[in-house]
Structure formats: structure tokens, C-alpha cells
Amino acid sequence: MTEFLDALRTVPLLRYALFAGILSSLSFGVIGSFVVCRRIGYIAAAIAHSVLGGIGAAIYFNRAHDIGWLNPMIGALFAAVLSALVIGCVSLQAKEREDTIIGAIWAIGMASGLLFLHFTPGTGVNLESYIFGNILLTSGTDVLATGVLSFVVLAVTLLYYHKLVAVCFDEEFARLRGLRSGGYFLLLLVLLAVSIVLLVRLTGIILAIALIVLPAATASRFSHSLWRIMILAVALSLVYTSGGLWLSFQTETPTGPIIVLIAAAGYVIALLKR
Amino acid sequence: MSDSAAMVRFEGVSHRYTKPLVLEDVTFAIERGDSVCVIGPNGGGKSTLLKLMLGVLEPAEGTIHMLGRPPRDARKRIGYVPQSIHFDPLFPVSAFDIVLMGRLDRLRLGRFSRECRQAASRALERVDLAAVAHKPFAALSGGQKQRVLIARALTGDPELLLLDEPTANIDLSIEERFLDTLEALRESMTVVLVTHDLDVISRVGASVLCVNHRVHRHSLPLAAETIREIYSGAHRIEHDRRVRHASGDHSACDHD
């Protein structure tokens, strides 16, 4: 442990990784609670996989057409929000087609991302760091962007908390009380999309869904109150990301999978305890 | 009371989802203070009638006025109690949180106002559930859950209460208290209640709308011949079981 604390003081990359983990935990603990209680984990998985399309396109246009401002984070954010809106609109307007469109967006995102990266000029892109994550590649700018996006997600959730809960519990009644329930469902999916993008650096596209779902699912075993589930999920997320970073540092193993396995172990223990 | 003061007025209303008409040339009015049960076979158009009253559906033909206005404009003055199968009964919210949802139209940003919270407390007291206000909704009995949903409808101070099969998922042994709540409500507001339950009709209804594509109004009590015409044997068997249960004969009941 002393060695890890010393490294935190002397190695900026490790410090950035810890800050990014703590800041993103705040948002995915809160949004993950909505995902688990509204039972839309499958939508979260589709959005996570669609992100590769945005990352691939951003890297391609950045290098092939010299669009300097278009970095992978912006591409991921654009793809995630677009996928969330498409899935949300289909879910609201044609529920019977929801599973088809989720499967399509899942596959199109991955396929287009791989194709864009194939045609990207220059030296090879580290695809593995996006698919499986590499928190140790986090920069100071990434930490700042993570902080800003986490703050936006938390602020919007706090302001619209009761309306989001009402739409998740009984969409029809919320609409009859004058709420634009479709709009609030789309807002929830956009917040979910932003939280997933925050997780891409941490755990990668494939493992992101685990950190959205597992802390909240574990927390829901201990409480029947949504806001208590959120607080517990945030606390668990902080423990998982910090603990995972420490363990991967000590054992010299990849951070993303370690974080996810710790979260999974927490969920299994919660299942066995109660 | 004149027809123009009707709480609910349907004039020549027809509605179809695909080809055949679900409701055909429906005309009726419900006056202030009435307590009306809507009955009829499955697929006969009961739920469609309720959705038309709420403005969720638009009629293909005819006009509908709720409290003298088009249904969408009258929604804030209508309390609605849906069937409990419409939502996840394990969703982690308290009874009080659910009742507060009846005041969503008065919520801007952040928390509900003190006035809204007081109205929610009063509504829970009205259905005799103040003691379980902060219990998880999932931990309540079927009858308590339905009374919470009634409190949610009442917290918006409605003039008209619409209930969609409120006894559909309630255990017989706790239904009595729920029926007391409904009986008390009919004294203070206009109630329209969709039900298959002949006992609810006899306790709560002052008259009956029989819906089977067309709508006919009957006063209560219903003649045995009318019940036979409206319902199949299964409903009469259930009615007979309840009559025997009430008289202490539990031979036809499922419970211990």
C-alpha cells in the first residue's frame, strides 16, 4: 500500500487515473441506479458498443482530413448520444421493434468503428485500449473533461430527479399529469450515454456495462429507496475503481478487468448474503 | 341537472383500432356526484372508453367533453387509478413518493413544495395509510398498493375519479377495507369505475354502463337476467363464491 501511495505522489498518470475513476464513479453510480431499477441494462450495452463507431470515425477524420479538434472522446460522445436518441425514439414510438434496433445499433457501431480504423492512415491505432480500456493513458485534460461531464450528469439528475423517477415508475400516469414523459425518458438515455463515454477510458467499451450495472445492482440488494441505492452505488463504485487501481498496480495486471472482477465479486457476495 | 353540466358527455362517439369498430355510436352523460360502474366482456371496449375519457385516444367520430372541455384540457381535474399491472411493483420508491407523483403538474425543478408534501400526507390519511407513508411500495399488500394509487389520484384534488379494474389483483380477505375506501369516495366526488366485480358494483355503483361495442345504461340493482346477459358463467361463479365466503362457507375459496 505504501508503494502505491508513493507512486500516487510521484507518477502523474497514476494520479490522473485515480481522479478520473473517482469523478466518473459519481455519475455512473447515480445513472446506473436508474438503469437497474428501470431495467434498461440492454440499452446501456447497445450504447456502449456503438461508441466504437464514434471513436473510429473521429480518429479517421482527424488523421485523414486533418480535423484537429475531433478527438476520440468527442466522437464517442456523439455516437453514444445519437444511439441513445435513436433507441429511445424507437422504444417510445414502436416498442415491438426495440430489440431489433438495439441489436442493429450494437453491431453497426462495432462494424463501422473497425472499418474506420482500418482505413485510418498513419501508424496503427491502439484499438485494445478502447475496447478493454486503459486508465493509465488518462491525461490531465481527460480528468478535466470527466469532471465537467460528471458534474453535468449529477446536476441534471438532481434537478429532474422526481420527474425521472415518475417516468421510470409509471410513464403513462406521468404523461397524464402533464409531463412530457417521452422527453424525460430520452433525457435519461442521454445521461446514460454520457456516463458510458466517461467509462470508456476506465474499463473500455465491452466492460463499461458491468460498471454501470453491478454497483447499482449490488446496492439494490440492501435498500428499497432509489436515492439510498444511488448513494450506496456511488460509494461502491469509488471502492471498486480505487481498489481496482491499487490491485492492478500491485499485481501488474490490466486495470479495467480487475475493476470489473472486483465489482462482480461484490455483487456475488451481496447475492449470497441476502 | 342539465346535460350541459355533465362531468362526462359522449355524443355519437365511435372508435376503431384497425377495421372493426371497438365502440360504435356511443352517447351518454354522467352528472356531477354520480357513481358509475363500467362493465362488459373482455374486448367489448371498456378500456378504450376510459382512454377516450382521458384523451389518450382521439375518437374517430363524435365529440367528447370532460368537465365541459375536451379531454386533454380537463386532465388536471381528473384523478386516474390505473391497473397495477401497468408498472413494476418492485420499483424502489416509498408510498409517499408515489402519492407525490399526483402533483407532478405543479413541480418545476428540484424538490416538491411544502404544499405538495402536505397534500400528499392528507391524501394518505384519507385512504387510512398515513402509518405506512414511508414504507417501500413493494412491501405493501395488494389492497394497500391500490389505496396508495387512489391517494396519488386524490392528491391532485380531482373533481372526477376514474378507476380501471381496481380490485383485479386484491386478495379477498383484505378487499373489504378497500371497498370501504371506494364507498367513502363516492360520497365526495364523481366516480367512474371499470370493473368485472359484481360486489364492487353493488357497493360502489349508483348505475351501470354496459359496454359491448355499444353502450347501454342500467340503474341498480341489476336484474339477474341482465347480469346473465352481460357476463359469462365464470363471473357468476366468482360472484357466488364471494357470497358464500361472506356467509362463512369457504369450501369454494383458495385461501386457508
Image (spheres, coloured by chain):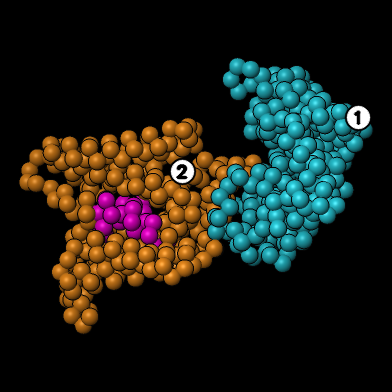
Chain colours: A orange, B cyan
Q: Is residue A10 left or right of residue B196?
A: left
Quadrant occupied by the N terminus of chain A: bottom left
| Res A117 → quadrant | top left
Same subunit, labels 2 and 1: the answer reads: no
Q: Can see residue B119?
A: no
> What kind of element bears circle 1?
loop
Q: Which residue is mark 2?
A: A186
Q: Badge 1, how many Cα within 10 Å: few under 14, some, many 20+?
A: few
- Looking at the image, which residue is at 16% across and 49% down? A127
Magenta stretch bounds: A194-216
Picture disc at residue B2 = 1
Q: Is B21 above or below relative to A101? A: above
User: Any magenta on residue A197?
Assistant: yes
Decide whether the magenta segment is chiefly helix, strand or loop. helix
- Check disc 1 and give the amino acid type: Ser
- Looking at the image, which residue is at 22% across and 56% down? A133
